[in-house]
Structures are given as structure tokens and as C-alpha cells.
Image: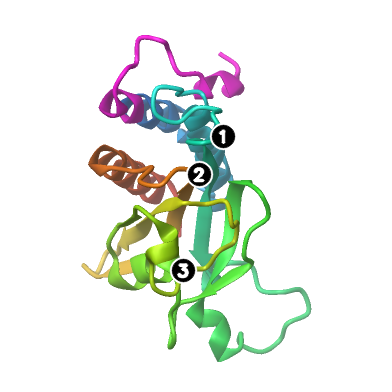
């Protein structure tokens, strides 16, 4: 099967629970045999974004309810050291999330997570919990990368280290043109996908 067909949603799928089970199963196949986080996050963002656009029951291409952005922000220390750099990265570089693989319009290049976090992604990362925002204009400190976005869901990417500690390495961020675009079923589905992505990559 061509890789692009992974984002097709069978007409037999009617509920969000069924939809997210389908996306999770397709993503497992796409990530099989690859451990690089850049490649895996790129395919995950594309699969989620295009599958949502192919699911007209709740999202689809309707401009009033479509998902308009899906992607990842990743802890800056996981990115390659700039060519020619000889010293350690500036302190502020370890307090940011940098834009990772995504689908949608151009987005903010970085998000500050410490010492003065701002926005949904920073809160999800720092608090290590999924944040569902029914109406972004009402969210304190919301960062408007796209003024058309009305609702948002952000899931943290949490790595379980061998010494028993947890480390947040990034977030999965999905935006919608509709107020109240995401519910508990979306939260559960995207949390499972976040866990799958984390387990499939070397961080």
C-alpha cells in the first residue's frame, strides 16, 4: 500500500473513538523500523492532519470546522548543535521549545517555557498534562500563530527514562477553526498517539 493511503479514512468509521483507533493503527505501521524523531514526527503530523481533513463527520474540509494546524514543538536541546558552534548553547536555548515537523500555515519558531512560560504549549509542557482549550481567545497568554484558530489541544511528549525519571521532550499541538473543536474522545486518542510517538523514537 502506498504510504499516502495511510491517511484515508474508511467510510465505515463513524465515531471519534473508531477514528482515533484507526489513526493509531496506521501510525504504528508508518513508524515501524524508524527511530529518528524528526522522521517519525513528520509522518505523525502529516497522518493526523490529513486524516482529520478526511473525516467530514466531525472535522473534514469544511472551513467552519476543519483542523488548520497539526505539529510538534520539541525541546531545543534535542536539535543539532549549529555548525561552527564551539561553546555550550546559551542558557536561554534550553528553556525553549523549537518548531518541529508540522502541517499547516507557518508557525511561531520557538515557545519560551522557562522562566516566564506563555501559551498553551508551554503550559502542557511544564505541567506534563494535556490541555484542551475550547476557545483560545479566552485562554490567558494564548499565542496566536494563526488568528483563524478558535480551539486547540496540546499533549505533552513524556519520556520514561531508565532511572525511573520522566522528561518532557516536546508537545503535540492541534488547532481547529471551530470553537469547542476537541472533546474527551480527541484527548484520549491524541494522548495514545503521543505515547506511541514517544516510544517509537530515540530521544
- Tell me the distance, in whole angstroms, between the alpha carbons under discs 2 and 3: 15 Å
Residue 193 appears anywhere in the view: yes
List the single residue furthest toward the left.
Answer: 164
Q: Vertical placement of 187 versus 54: above or below?
A: below
Neighbourhood count class around disc 1 (C-alpha, 10 Å): few under 14, some 14–19, many 20 upward? few
List the single residue furthest toward the top.
Answer: 12
What residue span does the magenta drawing correspond to? 1-20
Q: Point out the tag, 2 or 3, that comes first from the N-terminus.
A: 3
Q: Position of residue 195 (x, y in %)?
A: 32, 48
Residue 33 appears anywhere in the view: no
Q: Point out the tag, 3 or 1, that comes first from the N-terminus.
A: 1
Q: Quadrant of residue 114?
A: bottom left
Q: Which residue is mark 1?
A: 63
Q: Which residue is mark 2?
A: 177
Report if the CB atoms under discs 1 and 2 are less than 8 Å apart. yes
Q: Vertical placement of 45 versus 60: above or below?
A: below
In reply to whether residue 16 is colored magenta, the answer given is yes
Task: Kindly identify the residue that appears in the image at 56 percent across and 18 percent down.
Answer: 5
State left or right for residue 76 relative to residue 178: right
Which one is closest to the eye, mark 3 or mark 1?
Answer: 1
- Tell me the distance, in whole angstroms, between the alpha carbons under discs 3 and 1: 22 Å
The disc at residue 142 is 3
Task: Kindly identify the residue that appears in the image at 60 percent across and 17 percent down.
Answer: 2
Amino acid at each position: 500500500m502506498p504510504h499516502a493511503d495511510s491517511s484515508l479514512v474508511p467510510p465505515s468509521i463513524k465515531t471519534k473513538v473508531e477514528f482515533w483507533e484507526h489513526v493509531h493503527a496506521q501510525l504504528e505501521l508508518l513508524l515501524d523500523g524508524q527511530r529518528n524523531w524528526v522522521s517519525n514526527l513528520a509522518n505523525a503530523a502529516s497522518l493526523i492532519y490529513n486524516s482529520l481533513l478526511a473525516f467530514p463527520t466531525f472535522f473534514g474540509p469544511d472551513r467552519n470546522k476543519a483542523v488548520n494546524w497539526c505539529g510538534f514543538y520539541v525541546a531545543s536541546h534535542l536539535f543539532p548543535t549549529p555548525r561552527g558552534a564551539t561553546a555550550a548553547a546559551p542558557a536561554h536555548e534550553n528553556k525553549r521549545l523549537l518548531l518541529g515537523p508540522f502541517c499547516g500555515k507557518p508557525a511561531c519558531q520557538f515557545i519560551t517555557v522557562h522562566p516566564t512560560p506563555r501559551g498553551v504549549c508551554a503550559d502542557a509542557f511544564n505541567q506534563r498534562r494535556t490541555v484542551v482549550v475550547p476557545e483560545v481567545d479566552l485562554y490567558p497568554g494564548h499565542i496566536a500563530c494563526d488568528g483563524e484558530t478558535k480551539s486547540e489541544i496540546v499533549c505533552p511528549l513524556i519520556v520514561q527514562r531508565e532511572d525511573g525519571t520522566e522528561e518532557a521532550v516536546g508537545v503535540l499541538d492541534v488547532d481547529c477553526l471551530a470553537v469547542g473543536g476537541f472533546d474527551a474522545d480527541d484527548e484520549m486518542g491524541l494522548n495514545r498517539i503521543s505515547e506511541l510517538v514517544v516510544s517509537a523514537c530515540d530521544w
